[in-house]
Image (spheres, grey):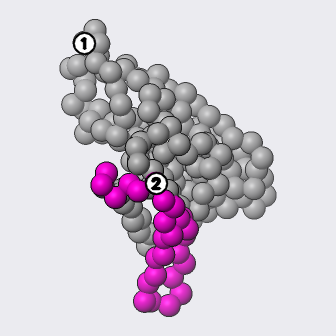
Amino acid sequence: FRYTLGFYPAQEDRDGVRHTLRVAVSKPGIALRYRQNYLASPAATANDNPALQQLLTDAADSLQVELSAAASPDEASPGSWQVKVNVNVRDLQLTHEDAKYAGGIDVSFHVEGAGKVVTKTLKIAIPDDQFAAFLENGIDTSLTIETTGGAGAVRVVVQDRNTGAAGSVTVPLSRR
């Protein structure tokens, strides 16, 4: 099982101080991964949105943009995986103009232990008459990635190009 906890301090609690976070569970043998602290900055700034490198290496998932991802072996290409990603449109800042909703996202993939990151930039242009379906189903994208030997996971990061808001998740690469 996997659980994700998140919170955002209320505006009146943004005191400009770095606060320590502590998470504990009573059941033995449970592994915890979480940020050790956070900065309660008085106002939202560009620094509220972490840089891609931090999102790729942080043990905790970012929760500003909801996404789901799954990986399966690519039978046509041994040693490769097909990574499918779904992004919640409700979490993106889209502009409405000329009878369509527009924006963009960067979807980055980093295989554990590999030195390179592959980023796909998706331009979004959803006609008004299709917007309700995208709200319900999200935006799908996928990428075939090559892995080396014992790669155990791929980190997927989605970042809104308009706001910098991001979501991230680690997907295990295991043959079942």
User: Residue 49: x and y, percent?
Assistant: 50, 43
Residue 136 shows in the view: yes
Mark seen at residue 16: 2
Observer-nearest residue: 4 or 113? 4
Residue 119 in picture, x, y percent from top left: 62, 34
- What's the magenta region? 11-38
Q: Nearer the viewer, residue 69 or 66?
A: 66
As drawn, 53 above or below 31: above
Indicate the amino acid at tag 1: Ala
Q: Main secondary structure of the magenta part?
A: loop
- The reply to whether callout 1 and callout 2 are in contact (CB within 8 Å) is no
Name the image quarter holding the C terminus: bottom right
Task: Check residue 99 in the rendering and tell me which mark sits there, or answer none.
Answer: 1
Above or below, 22 against 146 in this view is below
Could you tell me residue 67's position as x and y percent? 42, 47
Residue that lies at the very extreme toward the top in this rendered image: 98
What separation in Å lies between label 1 and label 2 (alpha carbons)?
Answer: 41 Å
Q: Residue at x 71, y 44 (%)?
A: 146
Between circles 1 and 2, the one closer to the viewer is 2
Residue type beneath disc 2: Gly
Q: Which residue is at 54% across, 37% downward?
A: 107
User: Depth check: 160 or 115 in front?
Assistant: 160
Q: Any magenta on residue 150?
A: no
Element class at badge 2: loop
Q: Is residue 21 above or below residue 137?
A: below
- Indicate yes or no whether the magenta region holds residue 22: yes
Identity of the residue drawn at 41% across and 65% down: 4
Image quarter in which the N terminus is found: bottom left
> Mark 2 or mark 1, which is nearer the start of the sequence?
2
